Amino acid sequence: MNKISLNTEGISDVTIVPNTFIDLFMPSANGSYVKVYLYLLRSFSNNNLEFTISTIADRLDNTEKDIIRALNYWEKQKLLKIERNSQKEIISIHLINLNSSTTNSLDSPIQTDDTEIDEIAVSIHTNKDPATRQRYSQEKITELTGNDEIKWAMHIVEIYLDRPLKPMDIQLILYLYEELHFSSELIMYLYEYCVSRNKKSPSYIEAVALTWAKEGIDTEEKAREATAVYNEHFNSVNKAFGLNRAPGQIERQYITKWVEVFSFTDDIITEACNRTILRTGKPDFKYADKILETWFKKGVKNQADIKRLDEEFAKGKANSKVTPIAKQTSNKFNQFPQRTYTAKDYAELERRLINKGL
């Protein structure tokens, strides 16, 4: 593994951890990534320390791939500038000064790690990209958090999340209040609802909020009604399929599709589930989806439409029956086509027999 040159700004011969890193970047980063960054700080302060991917991997008891993954993460967070050769190997790392003007405008780190986004929260009608929302400056944060309503909402959200608020949490709460115009009561219920589903990811919570905003849900009462409706849909499917558990992620995606895309009522969805059980003997969401998709394409709106399709199918099946052929004898040789022989054929056969006898 090639040796990597290190370059930095504003680091002395002691290891200094900038408060900006601790406040904004460390809370949301993977613990292994933090270890790599701290080791980088230590390495920058000692010019005599050999630095390669292999040495840092050995020092931190990680694989080389883990180290490279961590370096790529901090590069995306704009804490590092990495130079690579033609073989894509890292040959130089430049540490960015977090106190410089290039990072003063950052109010929270860029989120690049995987976050779970439940598809039911991300309405198919929502096309606004959560990543495009503005970042609030520290001055704006101080101004907004002086509001008693925001203070109380943030306190309740901390209780729901069971941890202190991170910078990204504060950014999201202010976004909900300032741009989506959610009341403090609606913000608190949003977090209550998401946490009750074991979803604490800011990405998930924001996706739910965008869905509510798109659907005109602007009060706690409307939000409670909307979530109750979804629970009714889930309960109907569970009852039809005989399930004694909450639907899984993929199953919720199917139910949401049936309700939001196909606009089917619970009785039609239940009918499809019942037919699925009769045909497959098990709660098969994929099979039920095929039934409902067919009905949707056929313009089904109610039970009468389903009955009409059933009758048309039965009639078409009856008309497609082939008229049976005349009954033949049970001789198995009748299954083969019979050949018709002429007088010329018999004469030729007789000639061959005579010649064979000679």
Image: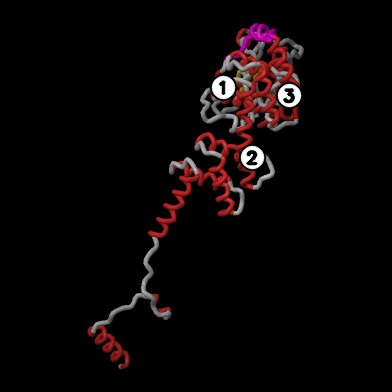
Q: Is residue 33 left or right of residue 265?
A: right
Outermost residue, front direction?
Answer: 304
Who's the residue at 69% across and 7% down the image? 146
Q: Nearer the viewer, residue 284 or 299?
A: 299
Q: Nearer the viewer, residue 301 or 143?
A: 301
Cβ–Cβ below 8 Å for labels 3 and 2? no
Residue 66 position by quadrant = top right
Residue of label 3? 160
Q: Nearer the viewer, mark 1 or mark 3?
A: 1
Who's the residue at 75% across and 13% down the image? 16
Q: Nearer the viewer, mark 1 or mark 2?
A: 2
Crowding at dot 2, Cα within 10 Å, few <14 / some 14-19 / many 20+, comes out as some
Q: Is residue 214 left or right of residue 249?
A: left
Label 3 sits on a secondary structure element that is helix
Q: Disc 2 marks which amino acid? A: Asn
If you read the primary sequence from the N terminus, does the residue marked by circle 3 or circle 2 appear first?
3
- Quadrant where the C terminus lies? bottom left
Q: Disc 3 marks which amino acid? A: Tyr
Residue 267 lies in magenta, yes or no?
A: no
Q: Can I make out residue 112 in this image?
A: no
Residue of label 1? 213
Rendered position, 264 above or below 94: below
Outermost residue, bottom direction?
Answer: 358
Q: Nearer the viewer, mark 3 or mark 2?
A: 2
Label 1 sits on a secondary structure element that is helix
